[in-house]
């Protein structure tokens, strides 16, 4: 069951639904009655993307599924790429696949944006990311889908020894949105950071799902996802870390912390650690709470209006995640994104 | 300056203040003393606009502005400042960012332009030095991990930066050792001016050795039951609050 399969066959019964355990909180079958026609080519509607301010970035643009299908970084090469997935149609569907290969010792700063310019489109993207020995990928993703869109991104990541993946995903959600990251972790000095931020309002939905499998000794995975939901929005966090037999000295930490700002909003969190090795250090923490009313009053008593006081507290809460972005320009974009998210309104 | 007339306040349906009246003219420092449960903190929270404090009767104004018609942040912009008995920790917000946000919000509400970063930092360095606050501490999240004394000093620092017209100090001496008490009091005294009024709420006379009041009021049973000069505070230290509790009952 997958969106890709359904788009290929035109058969809605191929869509994952809440009867599939992994899709329990992100029911695509209920959200989509029929598979729409294929999205048309469209080169006209390209405007400046969210990472436009980062001058050194070369652009790679895929519109409605049309565009390049490969990105490579040569051994030892450093590249900064603004990878833009643009969806411009209404009531159309598209699929795209992209293979990214970073060779030994390469460094890729991947500034990835998913930009919804249309309305009720359906988008399915598959990204395969190969990170060679000693290579690094800094991936910062902004999901800016249209509110009526259905969007699924599935990334499959393979790391070699001593490779690094640092990922931060920022989202405001969609009608149904799923961002999946599957990491095959070799241990052997490889390091993975998988972070996420969601700020959801109205009726939007967003699902960040990660699956990390530690297959060898001496690997690290550090995960921190934070978010806030208001109105009748729904956030899903599913994080699974498996430490296979023999993957000793694995250091895995997973944190998911969220704020619920209204009674109708919902957060579904499913952290899972499956550990088959003996000598590992693994921990996870998961909390959901409300904004601190006393802190809000304190801030207001200093002259800050309620909406700004809320924004200050919410962006400070999730700012812990964006502070971990090492690329200065991307971190600034992420921080501006937080302040512009409009989460302060009641 | 501050004028409170026949103020009645309930908290969760229980009457706490029962007809409190008070006038603090510009340039004066008034102390409010009273036993636990007399309504001292209720008075300060009601004046600055905390939710859950229901005014059932009476009025309060600052320079003629009806305080109860204003939101908490609007009262602050009019120049009202409360130094909290228990200052809140604000994780993730550096102290300087917090104060600059507050200062600019107040300036905006008053129709003034924003203060620029260089001018703000210059002012912050000056005020921090006079309060013996390490400048690096101002880069840390507000009050997070600060000691009780550091939090109180940070309240006075905010006060110095925001330059309010009327200050309410709620049990500012609690949790302070003698050295910190001196520094905090000097910070408060530096803000005394003919245009500024202060209300010092305290349980003990000790603070008033450092911040000398013009008038002392005794709050008991939700009302002012006695008023006098600074000597009243000394007298209370001798005799305690018992006789006033009886008057109020």
Image: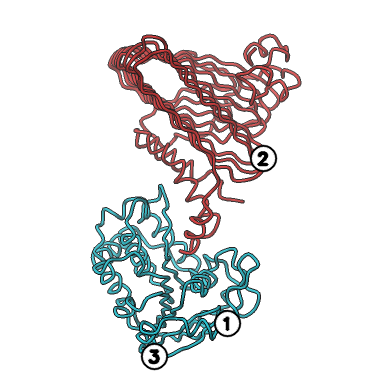
Label 1 Cα crowd, 10 Å radius (few <14 / some 14-19 / many 20+): few
Q: Are marks 2 and 1 on the same chain?
A: no
Q: Residue at x 73, y 15 (%)?
A: A12
Residue indicated by mark 2 = A232
- Where residue B136 appears, as percent x and y from the top left, is 26, 53
**Residue B64, picture quadrant:** bottom right
Question: Disc 3 or 1, which lies upstream in sequence?
Answer: 3
Please name which of the two marks, 2 or 1, marks the residue nearer to the observer: 1
- Pinpoint the chain carrying mark 3: B
Q: Colour of chain A?
A: red
Describe residue B66's horizontal placement relative to residue A70 as left or right: right
Residue indicated by mark 1 = B249
Please say if A157 is above or below B75: above
Please say if B148 is above or below A142: below
Residue indicated by mark 3 = B229
Q: Are marks 3 and 1 on the same chain?
A: yes
Secondary structure found at label 3: loop
Camera-side residue of A157 and B11 = B11
- Where residue A198 appears, as percent x and y from the top left, is 53, 36
Q: Residue at x 45, y 29 (%)?
A: A284
């Amino acid at each position: 069951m997958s969106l890709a399969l359904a788009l290929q066959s035109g058969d809605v019964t191929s869509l994952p639904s809440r009867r599939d355990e992994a899709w329990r909180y992100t029911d695509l079958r209920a959200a989509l009655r029929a598979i729409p026609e294929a999205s048309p080519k469209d080169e006209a509607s390209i405007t400046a993307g969210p990472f436009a301010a980062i001058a050194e970035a070369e652009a790679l643009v895929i519109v409605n599924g049309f565009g390049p299908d490969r990105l490579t970084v040569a051994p030892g090469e450093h590249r900064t790429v603004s990878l833009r997935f643009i969806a411009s149609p209404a009531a159309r569907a598209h699929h795209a696949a992209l293979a990214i290969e970073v060779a030994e010792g390469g460094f890729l700063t991947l500034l990835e944006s998913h930009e919804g310019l249309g309305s009720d489109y359906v988008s399915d993207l598959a990204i395969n990311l190969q990170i060679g020995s000693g290579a690094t990928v800094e991936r910062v993703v902004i999901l800016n889908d249209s509110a009526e869109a259905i969007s699924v991104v599935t990334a499959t990541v393979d790391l070699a020894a001593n490779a690094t993946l640092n990922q931060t995903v920022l989202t405001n959600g969609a009608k149904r949105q799923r961002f999946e990251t599957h990491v095959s972790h070799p241990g052997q000095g490889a390091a993975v950071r998988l972070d996420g931020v969601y700020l959801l309002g109205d009726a939007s939905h967003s699902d960040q799902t990660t699956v990390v499998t530690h297959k060898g000794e001496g690997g690290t995975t550090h995960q921190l996802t934070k978010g806030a939901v208001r109105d009748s929005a729904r956030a899903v966090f599913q994080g699974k870390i498996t430490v296979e037999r023999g993957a000793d000295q694995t250091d895995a930490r997973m944190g998911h912390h969220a704020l619920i700002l209204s009674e109708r909003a919902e957060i579904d969190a499913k952290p899972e650690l499956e550990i088959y090795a003996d000598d590992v250090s693994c921990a996870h923490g998961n909390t959901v709470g409300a904004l601190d009313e006393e802190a809000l009053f304190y801030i207001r008593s200093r002259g800050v209006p309620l909406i700004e006081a809320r924004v200050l507290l919410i962006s400070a809460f999730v700012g812990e995640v964006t502070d971990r972005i090492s690329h200065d320009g991307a971190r600034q974009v992420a921080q501006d994104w937080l302040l512009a998210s409009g989460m302060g309104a009641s | 300056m501050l004028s409170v007339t026949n103020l009645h306040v309930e908290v969760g349906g229980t009457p706490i203040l029962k007809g409190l009246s008070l006038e603090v003219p510009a340039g004066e420092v008034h102390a409010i003393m009273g036993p636990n449960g007399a309504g001292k903190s209720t008075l300060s929270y009601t004046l600055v606009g905390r939710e859950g404090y229901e005014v059932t009767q009476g009025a309060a104004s600052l320079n003629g502005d009806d305080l109860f018609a204003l939101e908490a942040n609007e009262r602050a912009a009019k120049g009202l400042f409360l130094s909290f008995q228990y200052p809140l920790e604000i994780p993730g917000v550096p102290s300087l960012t917090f104060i600059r946000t507050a200062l600019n919000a107040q300036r905006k509400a008053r129709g003034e332009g924003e203060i620029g970063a260089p001018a703000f930092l210059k002012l912050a360095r000056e005020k921090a030095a006079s309060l013996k606050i390490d400048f690096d501490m101002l880069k840390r999240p507000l009050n997070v991990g600060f000691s009780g004394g550091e939090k109180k000093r940070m309240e006075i620092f905010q006060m110095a930066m925001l330059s309010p017209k009327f200050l309410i100090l709620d049990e500012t001496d609690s949790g302070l050792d003698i050295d910190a008490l001196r520094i905090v009091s000097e910070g408060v005294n530096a803000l005394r001016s003919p245009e500024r009024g202060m209300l010092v709420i305290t349980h003990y006379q000790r603070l008033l050795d450092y911040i000398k009041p013009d008038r002392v009021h005794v709050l008991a049973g939700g009302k002012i039951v006695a008023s006098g000069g600074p000597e009243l505070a000394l007298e209370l230290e001798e005799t305690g609050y018992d006789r006033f509790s009886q008057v109020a009952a």
